[in-house]
Image (cartoon, rainbow, N blue to C red):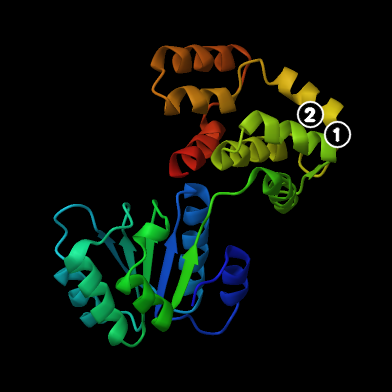
Amino acid sequence: MATSLPALRKHLSAAELAPVYLVAGAEHLLVIEAADALRARARELGYVERDVLDAEANFDWRRLGDAGQSLSLFASRKLIDLRLPSGRPGKDGAEALAAYCAAPPPDTVLLVTANDWSKKHEGAWTAAIERTGVFVPVWPLRREELPDWIAARAATRGLTLTADAITLVADRVEGNLLAAAQEIDKLALLHGGRTLDLAALEASVADDARYDVFRLADAALVGDAPRALHIVAGLQAEGEELIPMLGWILTQLRV
């Protein structure tokens, strides 16, 4: 069946998982987080063995069948994590996925993720997944949906934003959910447990003009080594401890 992200979250609270999942969309943050939630639930249910298959160009689709047939002596359940970046498996891949769905192996869950998606990607293989398991198309948020998404995400981080503060965040990120998520995480670290209105948020933005770990991560991730080193020097001059900052930087690298 095809379902939505909220419905998927509710589905994952069930006692058992479906044999196959397809999570696909160009909104990478939402795809990553949905797939992470499914992986976490699979671990809770005893799917401790995991095979990661990167279906890039020239991928041997026989590996999918092999992964479904082999189970470790030390595990009773397996998760097959198939990454299909283009969302297009080609003829061989479509046939392999349809064959897998026709007779999914026991005690095994197949998770297929794709970072590019439109109606043109759908075909017999996606129909096979819908019949056997769960298809989660992840569509980009519309502009009018962004404020509710920002408010909900802030709440999960222990942060409350007033309507005018939410509007400011939405305007700053211009529909980029990854930028919005980073902004909310930063605000939660600095002001967790508080309610931020427009004035408090603008003051926070002004305070952010000095050197901090967030700007260090931004400089490092875009490869601006001179600026990153300059920020490190500034942080050292301010007496900041550098080792604790690694947690934030590692989080950003993972995202």
Q: Residue at x 14, y 55 (%)?
A: 58
Q: Position of residue 42 (x, y in %)?
A: 46, 73
Q: Position of residue 180 (x, y in %)?
A: 62, 38
Residue 207 seen by the camera = yes
Q: Is residue 238 above or below residue 137?
A: above
Q: Residue at x 61, y 71 (%)?
A: 7
Checking the image for residue 37, the label placed there is none
Question: At numbered mark 1, what does the secondary structure look like: helix, strand or loop?
Answer: loop
Q: Residue at x 47, y 54 (%)?
A: 32
The reply, left or right, for residue 140 in relation to residue 156 is: left
Q: Position of residue 61 (x, y in %)?
A: 17, 67
The reply, left or right, for residue 7 in relation to residue 43 is: right
Quarter of image, res 93:
bottom left
Question: At numbered mark 2, what does the secondary structure look like: helix, strand or loop?
Answer: helix
Find the distance from the CA under tag 1 to the CA under tag 2.
6 Å
Q: Residue at x 57, y 70 (%)?
A: 8
Quarter of image, res 106:
bottom left
Q: Is residue 134 above or below residue 151?
A: below
Checking the image for residue 197, the label placed there is 1
Q: Is residue 224 above or below residue 155?
A: above
Residue tagged by mark 2?
A: 201
**Is label 1 in contact with label 2 (beta carbons under 8 Å)?**
yes
Disc 1 crowd rating (10 Å Cα; few below 14, some 14-19, many 20+) is: some
Kindly identify the amino acid type of the residue bearing the numbered disc 2: Leu
Kindly identify the amino acid type of the residue bearing the numbered disc 1: Asp
